[in-house]
Image: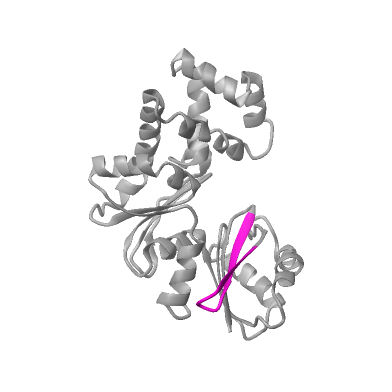
Amino acid sequence: MMTLVADSGSTKTAWCLTDGEHHELLMTQGINPFQQNEKEIVKLLREELLPLLSAEQIVTDVFFYGAGCTAEKSPVVASAIRQILRNETKIFVGSDMLGAARSLCGNNPGIVCILGTGSNSCYYDGVQILDNVSPLGYILGDEGSGAYIGKRLVGNVLKRQFSDHLCQLFLKETKLTTSAIIQKVYREPLPNRFLASLSPFCARHREMKEVHDFLIDCFSEFFKRNVNLYEIPELPVNFVGSVAWFYREELQEIAKNLGYRMGNIMQAPLEGLVNYHTQMNDII
């Protein structure tokens, strides 16, 4: 009697196979029903996940949370999973936002935020998501994300908004030129990932005042344009994602300055989701 819990992005899916006491981590490519059709997802699961499951490991419950798993697209993923597992297996598919909420808050209400390559947020009442401020993507929104930090960082460097020392340090460390940056942002695919790859520069130099001030401004925009709109300041603000984890000190500083109560900060939601489904709740 095994439970399979998954946290999926567009590039990779982390699965945890558990009997409630023992956990086994499995990895496959990412699954996103907006990027892959049902046939492609079935093929991926059959080639990558199924060989990792032994015949003795009977999966009775699957909880899958992923990017692109909207109410419209979730049945596509559920159907694909059912085709490689037993018909009586119980399958639940939810959004990555709901996964973040359950991982961070369990059955308690809170403001839930994702800060990774992109960003997102919601108001979670302990059972379901009641409000969600649209993230709008890295061009119109995604404040506080890796792509947002990278976009503003490289813009400030090329427009000489930072000191000359910091501008030269950035170009030296990244080995980038203006033409190379323009090429990657405007002419190559996935510019959001390129921009996000630049944000670790700030982590390496966060002790510099102008970098610290820049980070505080980036994350303040996230609070202003997302968290503040829920107008429930007494609830804890929780974060998950690589950017949230590596810049947790800056986030805690801003939350304190703005009068928010900081909740949990996690690098990834899988551990919290395993706990949610094996120790706290029956099948949802």
222 with respect to 242 (left or right): left
Quadrant containing the N terminus in the rendered view: bottom right
Q: Any magenta on residue 67?
A: no
Residue found at the very far bottom of the displayed protein: 88
As drawn, 182 above or below 16: above
Please give the name of the residue rendered at 29% of the width and 56% of the height, measured from the top-left corner. Answer: 236
Which image quadrant for residue 211? Answer: top left
- Looking at the image, which is closer to me, 118 or 59? 59
Please give the name of the residue rendered at 66% of the width and 73% of the height, measured from the top-left corner. Answer: 81
As drawn, 41 above or below 255: below
Which image quadrant for residue 172? Answer: top right
Q: How many marks?
A: 0
Residue 39 horizontal/vertical position (percent):
74, 66
As drawn, 267 above or below 14: above
Residue 7 horizontal/vertical position (percent):
55, 62
Q: Any magenta on residue 19?
A: yes
Please give the name of the residue rendered at 23% of the width and 55% of the height, measured from the top-left corner. Answer: 234
Q: Is residue 203 visible?
A: yes
Residue 232 horizontal/vertical position (percent):
26, 54
277 with respect to 41 (left or right): left
Please give the name of the residue rendered at 66% of the width and 55% of the height, measured from the top-left corner. Answer: 35
- Looking at the image, which is closer to me, 127 or 274? 274
Which image quadrant for residue 127? Answer: bottom left
Q: Give the residues drawn in magenta, as a range.
A: 12-26
Q: Is residue 199 visible?
A: no
- Looking at the image, which is closer to me, 216 or 92? 216
